[in-house]
Image (spheres, rainbow, N blue to C red):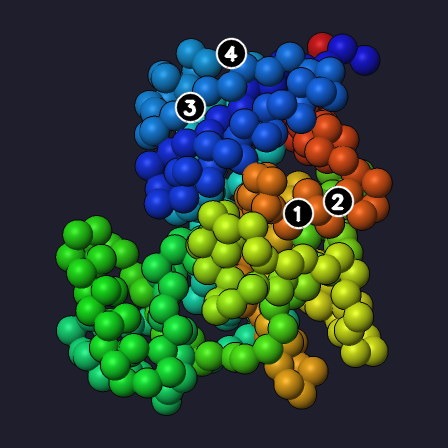
Amino acid sequence: MNLPTVLVLGGGPDAERAVSLDSARSVAQALRDAGFAVHHETIDRPSLADLRGMHGDVVFPVLHGAWGEGGPLQDMLNADGRPYVGSAPRAARVAMDKLATKLIATRLGVPTPVAVALNIRDAVCPLDLPVVVKPVHEGSSVGLHLCRDDAAWEAAFEDARRAAHHSPGRVCMAERLIQGRELTVGLVARNPGGPLSALPVIEIVPAAGPYDYGAKYERDDTGYRVGPDLPADVADRISRDAERLAAAIGVRDLARVDFLLDADDQPWLLEINTMPGFTSHSLLPRAARAVGLDMPALCGSLVLAALARQPAAARS
């Protein structure tokens, strides 16, 4: 089989640009190690003509955030016409919207903490403290605030108000704060075109404080336990719930679904990510390695899954 040339995209205009640049470098190197020819491009917000001028048979867009992961880039990739890794525009938009994801999870019977969109004209917290304040359409814990008292709430609200002023259209939410163990489930398609299936559960153990942007990408003191010791049925339950949520949204190729396990051993869904990180700290590659998929094998399988969506006549 002649391997396709892969166009790897990194960067983008979103707050997670730095993470995307690291992820894209890792993906590009892994694909070279797997034997693919790779063209690696750093982008901001290219036009369709710009994209069409970039060489490659298959596109691997390793972007994180509302533009690069949440639908607009996927619209452009559809118009470009080449197969690409990741979800189509509609699923990308729904998964990027934490409140929409919660509505679907509730319909499926997957427990998720109650949450309310913030009205930046009303400084009263819409839920009883403690709460988490975070953007509806961001990932990587960008803009995350834990509010256990009135002072923390007031600071979080002011930050959300300023952010909405500087970035019109940015929406934040308040979510009931769940204390507990942080768990994540990676999902990949084991066969091209097949449904997503769960990789081993990973427990995230921050050295101190929340699993925020710094703990994810800037420090080396966060612990990760692949296949942690969990109460009976919890791992199977959250793996099934992750698979069901991804299927209901229409996510394809890969995803990562985050949960919190409270003191009563009740798991709570937080969010789903349709383009998880591929940095040295990232969780999906860790889980894949546990089942024998190293980075070259993982990234290569995702490219082949995208290629399988292209009609046979177009591949000949």
Whichever of labels 4 and 1 marks the residue nearer the N terminus, that label is: 4
Q: Amino acid at mark 2?
A: Ala
Residue under label 2: 288
Q: Which quadrant holds residue 14?
A: top left
Q: Which quadrant holds residue 53?
A: top left
* Residue 175 image position (x, y, % from top left): 42, 75
Q: Look at 63% across and 62% down and name the residue there.
A: 204
Disc marking residue 55: 4
Q: Is residue 118 visible?
A: yes
Number of residues whose C-alpha sits closer than 10 Å to that of mark 3, classed few (under 14), some (14–19) or many (20 or more): some
Disc marking residue 42: 3
Depth-wise, is mark 4 or mark 1 nearer the camera?
1
Looking at the rendered image, the quarter that the C terminus falls into is: top right
Q: Amino acid at mark 3?
A: Thr
Disc marking residue 284: 1
State the separation of the CA atoms marked 3 and 2: 26 Å
Q: Look at 67% across and 57% down and name the residue there.
A: 224
Total numbered badges shown on the rendered structure: 4
Disc marking residue 158: none
Looking at the rendered image, the quarter that the N terminus falls into is: top right
Element under disc 4? loop
Do the residues bearing badges 1 and 2 touch, measured as CB atoms within 8 Å? yes
State the separation of the CA atoms marked 2 and 4: 29 Å
